[in-house]
Image (tube, rainbow, N blue to C red):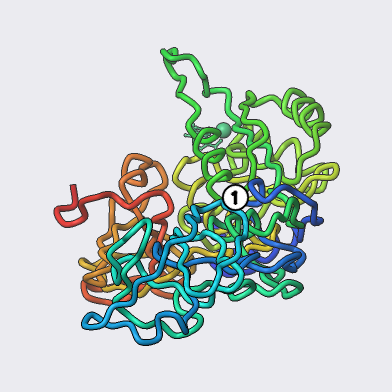
Amino acid sequence: MAQHPAPTALRPVSEHQRRIADLLGLLTPTRVAPAEARGLVLAEPVTAPEELPSFDNSAMDGYAVRAVDVAGASEAAPVRLPVAADIPAGAGIGVLEPGTAHRIMTGAPLPRGADAVVEVERTDAGTDVVTVSAAREPGSFIRTAGSDVTAGTEVLPAGTLVGAAQIGLLAALGVRAVVVRPRPRVLVCSTGSELTDDPVPAAGQIRDSNSHMLAAAVEDAGAVAIRRLWVADDVPTFLSTLDAELEAGVDLVLTSGGVSAGAYEVVKDALAPRGVEFTKVALQPGMPQGSGTYGEAAVVCLPGNPVSSLVSFEVFVRPALRASYGHPRPHRPIVRAALTEAITSPGGKRQLRRGRLDAVAGAVRPWGPPGSGFLGWMAGADCLIDVPEDVTELAGGDPVDVWDLTSWGRPATRSGGS
Ligand code: AMP
Ligand code: MG
């Protein structure tokens, strides 16, 4: 018991979240091509340089006419008009003489003089002479210039998350560049002399999973993992590696391992004397945490156990990364669901248990043991069950907050639990 600090010595999760978000801050906006803005957020609004559609065009395949020339048309008393022209999409703008029709395709420009389109379904589809069996009001089936977007209006306000529809609109308007906050550049660094990339690890060695996992999580958060590496538990090697890598320009150094209370804690040994703060956060898993700056970069030091690493990335790093480029929803969506079975949680620590959510039934099933060494279970989970600091026991049926992690892909079958 003696080596465990009293719960009051632990930093609340929300306080450490704020500290990490403050460390990263807001990145400076930059100008990029629309395709590169996908998943990013506009830092400046986009004003339409022109109107959409840019010319009056047909909303249907049919016949461009003067409404007055088909005014009396009906099934019983159809009107026959000579077809004076054929207008495919992409044609130039023609002129319709009174008493004639032009066969027109969807999106093709309305000829001057025409004020209505009769759908092909209400005609005999004639090519020389067309028989029209319905009257149409002026304006029928015409998309008028500017009816979608007016030139000079703000079509995309600052703060818009750029996705497929926005990229489509920018392309339609001929906008070649937009101003967004850039993707944060993250250096992902695993530490540990036991780690290897060797396909067949020697006795006592393990494969480095954290750098692969955290690089994926970084990219999933909309940031760029500019480098992924691991270094042995050796302070001079660790520091010289960081110094070399930082020359490329890095917003965040994200380390894993070497932050707890044992010997050979390389990250702590190297960075604590250089102003990085190492602290214990009231979180399970993920209690030992480091944060600060090194050179120009923010530094976040996560614990080495893979589950602790990924859960603390979720809690502290993902929201801070997303906030740094202005994402309107930095946090995972939280849903309320009923536990399928009882769980316990340590007093004085916020517990984030892995779970599987059945959002339709509003039920969440604890998935695997609470310990930090169960990466296999974590890989089968699709949510985190958030148990508050002061709660030590929950019964089956109790409601809990659940962080929906489904951007990792929800498993197809959720019913049987296997
Ligand atoms: P540490 O925080 O360095 O004491 O590591 C805690 C535990 O996590 C140890 O069992 C490590 O072997 C393991 N670990 C640390 N880093 C990694 C990594 N990159 N990949 C897989 N396991 C790791
Ligand atoms: Mg280690």
The relative height of residue 71 versus residue 173 in the rendered view (above or below) is: below
Q: What element carries label 1?
A: loop
Q: Residue 67, how many percent across, how many down?
A: 46, 81
Q: Along the line of sight, which residue is nearer the eye, 208 or 262?
A: 208
The relative height of residue 200 versus residue 301 in the rendered view (above or below) is: above
The relative height of residue 310 versus residue 106 in the rendered view (above or below) is: above
Q: In this view, does 94 lie to the left or right of 199?
A: right
- Residue at the left extreme? 416
Q: Residue 153, how many percent across, how many down?
A: 72, 75
Amino acid on which disc 1 is placed: Gly
Q: Write down the residue under mark 1.
A: 222
Q: Residue 225, how many percent across, how many down?
A: 63, 38
Q: Along the line of sight, which residue is nearer the eye, 407 or 180?
A: 180
Q: Quadrant of residue 29?
A: bottom right
Q: Is mark 1 within 8 Å of ligand 1?
A: no
Q: Along the line of sight, which residue is nearer the eye, 261 or 202?
A: 202
Q: Along the line of sight, which residue is nearer the eye, 328 or 94?
A: 94
**Residue drawn 59% across and 43% down?**
261
Q: In this view, does 412 lie to the left or right of 148?
A: left
Q: Is residue 3 visible?
A: no
Q: Can residue 91 be seen in this view?
A: yes
Q: How many labels does the image show?
A: 1
Other-residue count near label 1 (Cα within 10 Å), few / some / many at <14 / 14–19 / ≥20: many
Q: Locate ligand 2 by image quadrant.
A: top right
Q: In which quarter of the image is residue 341?
A: bottom left
Q: Residue 223, how many percent across, how many down?
A: 63, 47
**Residue drawn 70% across and 62% down?**
42
**Residue drawn 29% across and 76% down?**
133
